[in-house]
Amino acid sequence: MLLAATIAGCAGAPTVAPRLILETGTLKRSIVAFNANATALASAEANGEITVWSLPDGQLQRQWRAHTDSVHGLTLLPGDRILSASYDGSLALWTGAGELLRRERTPAPITDAAVHVAEGIIVTGHTDGRVRRWRISDLQLIESVHPHRGGVRAVAYHAPTQRYASSGHDGAVYVWRQGEPVRALTAPPTDARDLAFTPDGAWLYGASWFKVFRWDLADGALTIQNTEHRGIITSIDMSADGRRLATISRETDSAVQILDTATGTPLVRFQSHELCGGYVQLSPGERFLATTSDDATVRVWDLDQ
């Protein structure tokens, strides 16, 4: 396994080269999503374009213009469908061939999204400070909550406990369950740019300048972890066992790492992007790690090698 081999040699701070470097064609941040068996990878660009590649060979399958603005939510659904959420103020369902099945306008631009396929819901954060929950099957609004005084930066959802979380430009971080009051966590010193629950739902992690935030959801207490990142950690993704956190950063740094969730220390250091990092995602089964960047590439690492 790549992880064990890299830990053994960490004294020399090695970096791991990507298996694939896929060209996206836009010098802007984009996001990625794997299908359930990690045989396909999709990216969505700042210009609204969606691209799908096959894995592990990285062959281009299809590409189309899905939105008129940046895409902040992307999911490959069962039945060869794709769900996208955009700053242009719309949710859209597509066939795998890129044909539009349904588009639903949202009351405000979408800034982030979290999807739970088994429950058939998508949770979206918006510029109006609201967090909304939608049904995937027909893109109908189920619930709207207004926790933030400014725009929402990030949202997360933990299905086993039915717990939602959001962070905003107002600096606040909230958690709540459906039908219960919104609860403020200890405010972090800087905005939380991304959020991720641990698998047991006991902790919430956040990304920020140089550091990772960790909230104990029993009492809302905040712990701040130092990292080796030298810029804004823009995106994080939690491993299935809750012991590792994939991270990527930007501005003065473009590092890609897997951190120990207990300490914030790097377990694996990957080769940096040429320009600012954007988004990071572990595949189902955690064979692959994919990242995006302003350098107009999607990089894919094979963690089984």
Image: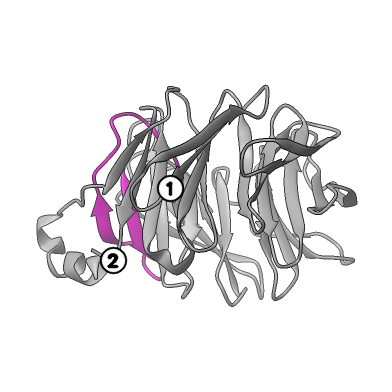
Tag 2 residue: 304
Q: Name which residue lies at 23% across and 65% down.
A: 2
Label 2 element class: loop
Earlier-in-chain disc, 1 versus 2? 1
Side of 193 relative to 99 (left or right)? left
The reply to whether discs 1 and 2 touch (Cβ–Cβ < 8 Å) is no
Range covered by the magenta-colored residues: 254-280
Question: x, y percentage for residue 144?
Answer: 87, 49
| 148 lies above or below 195 | above
Disc 1/disc 2 C-alpha distance (Å) = 18 Å
Three-letter amino acid code at the position of disc 1: Ser
Q: Which residue is mark 1?
A: 54
Q: Count residues near mark 2 (Cα–Cα under 10 Å), then give few for <14, some for 14-19, many for 20+.
A: few
In which quadrant is the C terminus drawn?
Answer: bottom left
> In this orientation, does residue 120 appear?
yes
Task: Measuring from the top left, give residue 100's x and y in whole percent.
Answer: 74, 35
